[in-house]
Image (cartoon, grey):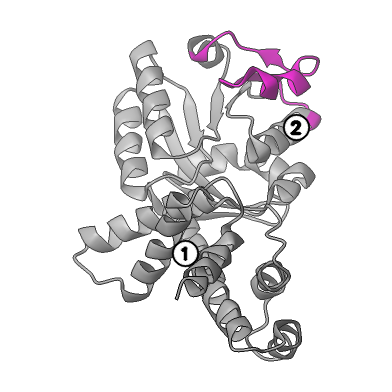
Amino acid sequence: MKRIGFIGLGRMGSGICHQLISKGYSTAVFDINATNLQAFAQIATIAADKKELLESSDVIFLSLPGSVQVEETVHEFISYGISGKTIIDLSTSYPLSSKELYHKVTAAGGFFADASLTGTPTHAEQGALIVTVGGDMETYEDCLPIISTFASRGVHYIGGPGAGNIAKLANNYLSIMYVALYAEIFPLAEKLGFDTQKLFEIIGQSGVSCPMYQSNGAKIVNKTYDPSFSLDFALKDITYVKRLFDEQQMPSFVLDGGLNLLRLGHLKGYGSNDLSEMARVTRELMEHE
């Protein structure tokens, strides 16, 4: 059984790591936040640093905020020597960065895959994520039994390096823009004097209804903004998608509106709050008209 290394024990990473350990994998963990390590003190090896983790592992999972942190970690690994090691990036990273890291790791004698996640921290705790993998088919097949421990809803090989993150960004783009639509229309209806709770229920009986509508639309109508996915993470993902449009010299008409709304939310200090607080931004703008 392969030895596992895991870096990044945030809300998603922690649940995934617990699943790996519960399935019998010997696991070393590292996180810059010592508090995140406490839950693993009795069930995993706490690595003193990234080098120690790398040396004691065959397959290393990264669950980090984004490409900046992933690039920094992978380049550090390459400097130590990664021949025969497999690095799997679970972060939502920039696809072209993933592709570049794949080539660098391969040239250094290692293996690299981007394995993007669909699901919530609760899904991670339950081992019920969906994973889309980009990279070599051989790496996918070699690591499939490991990834399957936390992805009971499906593990899919989707293409070459970067493809896993393209799939994730496509999914997140659609999800985030749905919320942006709800964040505009319900405050407008509210300002026009509508009973938005009744409007929400009526729309929920139409073809517009979907799990995203039922969860995020309700937060916006009820003004609860319950935390699930942070506004700043949404801003990061949409910025990645914008870069892809720009590099292909393509316009992004709908995206630009959502991106500006997210930027306003960040500037107002809502970045660490839930994505649905885009509606708070809209309400505040309407109040000043």
Callout 1 environment at 10 Å: few (<14), some (14 to 19), or many (20+)?
many
Tell me where residue 254 sits by quadrant: bottom left
Q: Which of marks 2 and 1 is nearer the N terminus?
A: 2
- x then y, percent, for residue 169: 45, 58
Circle 2 — which element? Answer: helix
Query: Which residue position is annotated with label 1?
Result: 173
- In screen coordinates, is 273 left or right of 281? right
Residue positioned 76% across, 42% down in the render = 125
Kindly give the residue lying farthest to the front in the view shown: 288
Write the start and end of the magenta stretch as one range: 22-50
- In screen coordinates, is 257 left or right of 174? left
Viewer-proximal residue among 2 and 228: 228
Residue positioned 38% across, 12% down in the render = 80
Q: Is residue 68 above or below residue 265?
A: above
Query: Which residue position is annotated with label 2?
Result: 18
Disc sitting over residue 115 in the figure: none
Residue type marked 1: Tyr
Residue positioned 32% across, 60% down in the render = 242
Quadrant where the image shows the C terminus:
bottom left
- In screen coordinates, is 139 left or right of 274? left
Residue positioned 40% across, 56% down in the render = 263
Q: How far apart are marks 2 and 1 (CA)?
A: 29 Å
Q: In this view, does 56 lie above or below 17?
A: above
Viewer-proximal residue among 242 and 160: 242
